[in-house]
Image (cartoon, coloured by chain):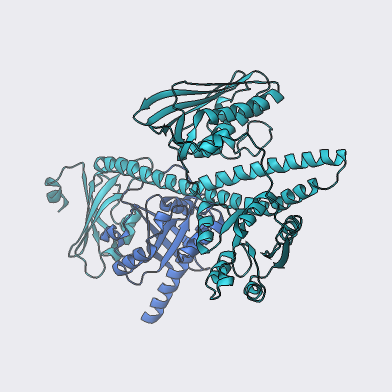
Amino acid sequence: MNISKKIVVLGYFGVGKTSLIRRFVENSFSNDYKVSIGVHIVKKTVQVSTDDTVSLILWDLEGTDDIASVRESYLLGTHGIIYVFDVSRPSTFQSIEKDLEALAKKVPGVPTQVVGNKIDLVASEEVDATLTEKGISFDYLTSAKTGEKVNELFEHLAKILALDAERIKGKLQ
Amino acid sequence: MLKELRENYNRDKFQFILTDLTGRVVQSDQTLLSVEENVAIGEAHPFFLSIPEIMDAGRETATFHCVQLGTPMARLTADIEIHRKKDGFLIVIEDLTQHYRSYQKMAQTRNESIIDSELIVLKNHELQERERFKNEFIQNFSHELRNPLTNIIALTNILQRTDLSEEQLGILAVLKDSTSNLKLMLEDILSIAMIAKGKLALNPSVFNFPHFIEFLKLTYTTRAKEKGLAFSVTTDEKIPEYLEGDRIRLLQVLTNLCDNAVKYTKEGTISLHVALNQKRANTASLRFSVKDTGPGIPPESLGTILESFEQLGQTEGVGLGLAIVKGLLDLMGSTIKIESEVGRGSHFYFDLKLQFPLREPIRPAARKHLPPTKAKAPAKDTQKYRVLLVEDNEQVQTSLFKSLIEPGNFFIDVVSDGALVMQEVVNSKYDIILMDVNLPNITGDQLTKAIRAFPFKDVKKIPIIGITANSYKAQIKAYKKAGMNAVITKPFEQNELLKTMQRLLK
């Protein structure tokens, strides 16, 4: 089975969305911050089992300080969401719950991965303490700079989407 | 069909693509993207791979703004419209690269500035946290030092009054000198912690300025002489005789500056000069300056020299002097300024506005005629008193016990458990209570409140002296409010305790 799935990567500006995608697709990283505007789309195919692959069509959305203002059209036909925040900047994760609620209304039932990026900038105990204190749950803590947990994140989402596709296929048969 | 569409648009800025419902290209321009006919549109760019899902559920049109379709070599930012047609989709791509370039520049500037200011706030917060931690540590550390220091001072005083050989007296003198230095350092540490926590309040009063300066002159002429240095003091004659300000804190600032000058200068002169900048109504603006011929401060150290625990080279002390000067002057609304040249010396100066009374204050007449007297020991009292000492620290118990045994007119009972105090107070008749404040389970001020609330007059009226290492004014005020008649802070001299006890026992 070879399927294509649209993944939207979003979050506040400067959290490292483009860097995460670049690390995953090109295995490279740049320290320079270049603002992404609009949407940039790339594709990478992931082998999820011996016979199955998932082509992830990654939509790297322009960062915003208000997720509710993300253009509706960018979310059309989305199969998965990666919500990225920066563990070193509390302003990027202070509204996670509200943002996820807004997204769930716009694209209901879409699998979402919450990712704290830039863990190379903060001591791990400090990250744990801050996130626990603020009651923030996440799926992955990553570093686009070092590559930590980046492939795991995308591959995990690819597997979730492959399983969903299997389930739907099973139901249809 | 494409020909008709193109007639209405600028040829170079648009590209029209027709696909069938599966996304296979039926017809296309080559204006912006290279698109082959009979090939899946997704081959041209991954954006188009999602068209079937985007146009799912019978959607007629979809518009996408600011889509990056370019390659690292050729930039293309476009708006894309997808229209559902009878047999497929019409895709219209409009090249808006120039338009979005200016938007990108704007966003870059805006985001960078927001991120930078966020990082500055975070950095400041981190620095404040470190400062808070440091001050907490200093406070706790100095608190812990006070108990053993109290014991050392008390026991040294007792030891001094025993029969000692010449050699032992010499050793004791060094011990007393070291204890006194340690006490001064501890006071410095506490001052800096109190300044940093904003708990130090100024206590202004009218003082005699020539006497104030004379004191400094006497102190530092002697100290400078010991190091083979000269110390000169000059003041402006027009400075009013009486000034109003916190004399103790001003003295602390000037002694720290003079101490530093003596400490770092190996030869030459140290001069203290006070000039009158301006005199207006009942306010005088004075410039205090301390100059030395010491080694000077390297330019790279000028920025940090006023921070806590900063020292130039290996010297005695804890490096708090200038930080205290800075903190105290901040509190007084002034700023320390430094001019220094390596190898030539340093000049520390500050301007201070002080009020002066329009009339000379009335001086106590009696004091004028009294000959100078040495500090007197408390008058001998032959009456016997019963003392309850509430103290859990064994070392403090021992030193207090010895201090009180020596005069010979106190019978002392010691209780180390706060819970037993009430029982003792009711069952035995005490003349005075010495109450440690930091007791386990129940605090000394809570016990005092309980005693003061007792229904029997002979119990509720027992004088209570609080003994504590907490020296903040607010804390002492709270202990007195709880009912303590007096509070003595550690470390204290035996005389101070005995005098306070005698005053309350009268």
Q: In the image shown, does B299 or B503 lie closer to the viewer? A: B503
Provide residue B20's location: percent of width, then percent of height.
24, 62
Instruction: Tell me the quadrant of the picture where the C terminus of chain A can be found.
Output: bottom left
* Chain B display color: cyan
Could you say which quadrant of the image residue B99 lies in? top left
Which residue is located at x 57 percent, y 57 percent?
B486
Residue B140 in the image: above or below residue B419: above
Vertical order, B24 against B169 (above or below): below
Q: Quadrant of the N terminus of chain A?
A: bottom left
Tally of marks: 0
Q: Position of residue A63 (x, y in %)?
A: 35, 52
Using the image, determine if residue B96 lies above or below residue B85. above
Left or right of residue B313, residue B236 in this image: left
Q: Is residue B370 visible?
A: yes
Q: Position of residue B369 (x, y in %)?
A: 57, 33
Determine the image quadrant of residue A85: bottom left
**Residue A28 visible in rendering:** no
- Which residue corresponds to the image point at 35% horizontal and 63% vertical from the top-left? A99
Q: Nearer the viewer, residue A19 or B280?
A: B280
Q: Nearer the viewer, residue B315 or B111?
A: B315
Chain that is coloured blue in the picture:
A
Does residue A95 appear left or right of residue B338 in this picture? Answer: left
The vertical placement of B460 against B197, above or below, is below
| Residue B259 left/right relative to A89 | right
Q: Position of residue B467 (x, y in %)?
A: 62, 58
Is residue B136 left or right of B385 when viewed as pictured? Answer: left
For the point 42% across and 77% down, the residue is A167
